[in-house]
Image: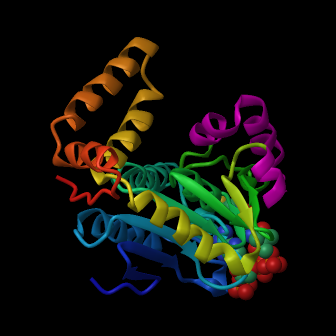
Amino acid sequence: MGYELLTFQVADRIATITVNRPDKLNALNDALMRELGVAIDEARDRDDVGAVLLTGAGPKAFVAGADIGEIAAQGPVDGKARALEGQRVFRRLERCGKPVVAAVNGFALGGGCELAMACHLRVAAEGARFGQPEVKLGIGPGYGGTVRLPRLVGRGRALELLLTGAMIDAQEAFRIGLVNRVVPAERLLPESEQLLTAILANGPLAIQACLEAVDTGLDLGLDEALLLEANLFGLLSGTADMREGTAAFLAKRPPRFTGA
Ligand code: COA
């Protein structure tokens, strides 16, 4: 499909998805959310894609939230439907089986912060700003903010952000564990790509299993989560990649993983 509100480019096994509505600070309207869903599925399904880098067009914003014009016009039924649809798209991203890095180049507010949190890792430019300002509009988060934020930064810090609607800078986001690293703006894309390249050097099935173990395991009890880990460990032991990785180590040579 051709995209109008985002760009999709593949280089060196990394699909870069750039939300491209800079005149509205990349706010997520329904059409953009639909395209994002299609782009995520394309990245998941393409064999030449091993990882995803998600960013925003322009110097100012990653994504400044859901489109407030559309929110203003919604009633309870379509409001709920909009939240469910956004949650489904973000969940597809989180469960796509390939590592996703958010390269946060500016404002990540409301749905933008929620989108960044649905990515597996977050790299922020020094000038990036994060927040869940929905309460300032008389509404609450709808795309997973009350669910993922406390899981990432803890209940107290999450509630402070959710209840005040305050914006925090990239260093504060790093301090509380909301982002993995902070880099100068000009290093944002190179550092994000380097991070994904380092991940892509590892066994793809092992990466997929780690993503699944953490995503599913966090919501299980300790014993069930440990059993899931053991099951995945056993499953990986049947792969050519495991034989290749261990043989390469023993032969003191770099591994050549095939994802089989
Ligand atoms: N939805 C729709 N439009 C948005 C938007 C959003 N979430 N965020 C920004 N825009 C639009 C503005 O309306 C403006 O459009 P216009 O030029 O046609 O008037 C354009 O993007 C630029 O934004 P502007 O507010 O002029 O930039 P700024 O530098 O003064 O302020 C922000 C930047 C991010 C502080 C401010 O835009 C803002 O608070 N945005 C809303 C954030 C939010 O509440 N998100 C959660 C939504 S649920």
- Can I make out residue 167 in this image? no
- Can I make out residue 4 in this image? yes
Magenta span includes 150: yes
Range covered by the magenta-colored residues: 146-175
In screen coordinates, is 234 left or right of 40?
A: left
Question: Residue 234: x, y in percent?
Answer: 23, 28
Camera-side residue: 8 or 231? Answer: 231
Question: Residue 173: x, y in percent?
Answer: 77, 52
Q: Main secondary structure of the magenta part?
A: helix
Determine the image quadrant of residue 107: bottom right
Question: Residue 153: x, y in percent?
Answer: 70, 38
Question: Residue 79: x, y in percent?
Answer: 51, 53
In the displayed structure, would residue 6 be above or below residue 237? below
In screen coordinates, is 153 left or right of 208?
A: right
Quadrant assignment for the N terminus: bottom left
Query: Residue at the top extreme?
Result: 223
For the point 45% across and 50% down, the residue is 87
In screen coordinates, is 219 left or right of 241?
A: right
Camera-side residue: 203 or 175? Answer: 203
- Number of numbered discs visible in the structure rendering: 0
Q: How is the image coloured?
A: rainbow
For the point 24% across and 43% down, the residue is 242
Report ligand 1 position as a quadrant.
bottom right
Camera-side residue: 254 or 86? Answer: 254
Camera-side residue: 247 or 117? Answer: 247
In the displayed structure, would residue 44 be above or below residue 88? below
Magenta span includes 55: no
For the point 15% across and 37% down, the residue is 238
Determine the image quadrant of residue 195: bottom right
For the point 55% across and 45% down, the residue is 144
Query: Residue at the front extreme?
Result: 251
